[in-house]
Amino acid sequence: MASEFFETEDHGGVVLHEGRRLTADVVVAADGVGTKSWALVVGRKDPPISSGFVLYRVTFPVAPALENPVIATELEGFSDRAFLHAGPGAHVVTCKSENDICWLLTRREDGGDAEENWAKATSTDKALNAVEGWEPFVTELIKATPNHTVLDWKLMWRNPQPQWASPGGRVVQIGDAAHPFLPTSASGGTMAMEDAYSLATCLQIAGKSDVSIATKVHNHLRFERVSCAQKMGFKNREIYHNTDWDAVSKNPEILGKMVGNWVVCHDPEKYAYENYTQCAEHLLTSTPFENTNAVPGYIYQPWTVKELLDASDSGKPVQDEGDWS
């Protein structure tokens, strides 16, 4: 485990928890939201902000659940299947594989402490209360949960952080270390993989002598795109919990499509190759450069978690220009 990150003019470094020090031309902090790299990269670590929602989640063997006729009928003929159920103030995602089944229910916070904790458990009674009156498959699946216990995961959020590379460019954050996501974005893993392709490409182009600019080019190429993808977590949840069912009846894809074409149809490696030189010149000499890898027709605007939550609570969620579909 990395307990500290540091850099010199020529190297990045990390101190492991037992005190061992390692150095390299560049250090990639890919150690999640708990990373200690924030102290070096931006000089602070902003505290998490409650999203106002909680997620109950669990995975268990599917065989005992299939003894319930309601569950068995719904899953009959499928070796794997995924569902999305949406209703007032909550939504449930269910995924079945050959041997296991999992369900994830997101709802307004239930009054418990909002803290970052990935191991806290609670009773399925809270989940059942959130879906009272929903179709039997949902309630029966929750009742089939072993020991009637699920993970109680308060969904915490962080404001988009535009700086992922250290001042000297020898340490760079990727994935959740740089940009945590809400589950409803359905893009956290995708953006982490894109980071890897983009960073590798920038380092290849720059070579060993220009590592410090390569990490900053990567950062600049990626930030606005990733920030828009983070915002999708909020946008999707608004759709699921405040659904316009008349609109859905005319266009079911409103609920069925969690990520837009601008996310799916992107090649981060190609984008880095095509834009590296111009972006580097922009960073070094302030020549004009604009990214084109985010939402078509949308001019990027900084945003905060509080801004989005306040807009939602007022009944007027933020509406953005551009084609997010």
Image (tube, rainbow, N blue to C red):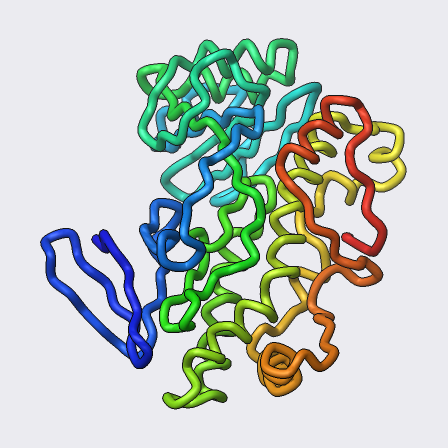
Q: Is residue 64 above or below residue 81?
A: above
Residue shown at the point (69%, 22%) measured from the top left: 87
Residue shown at the point (54%, 52%) measured from the top left: 161
Quadrant hosting residue 25: bottom left
Viewer-side residue, 234 vs 213 = 213
**x, y (%) of residue 190?**
53, 58
**x, y (%) of residue 310?**
71, 27
Is residue 102 left or right of 181 when viewed as pictured?
Answer: left
Is residue 255 left or right of 44 when viewed as pictured?
Answer: right
Q: Is residue 225 above or below residue 289?
A: above
Viewer-side residue, 67 vs 207 = 207
Residue shown at the point (75%, 26%) measured from the top left: 242
**x, y (%) of residue 220?**
59, 69
Quadrant hosting residue 139: top right
Residue shown at the point (38%, 26%) measured from the top left: 151
**x, y (%) of residue 279?**
63, 79
Tally of marks = 0
Viewer-side residue, 8 vs 139 = 8
Is residue 161 left or right of 314 when viewed as pictured?
Answer: left
Viewer-side residue, 319 vs 166 = 166
Is residue 52 left or right of 118 when viewed as pictured?
Answer: right
Q: Is residue 99 above or below residue 151?
A: below
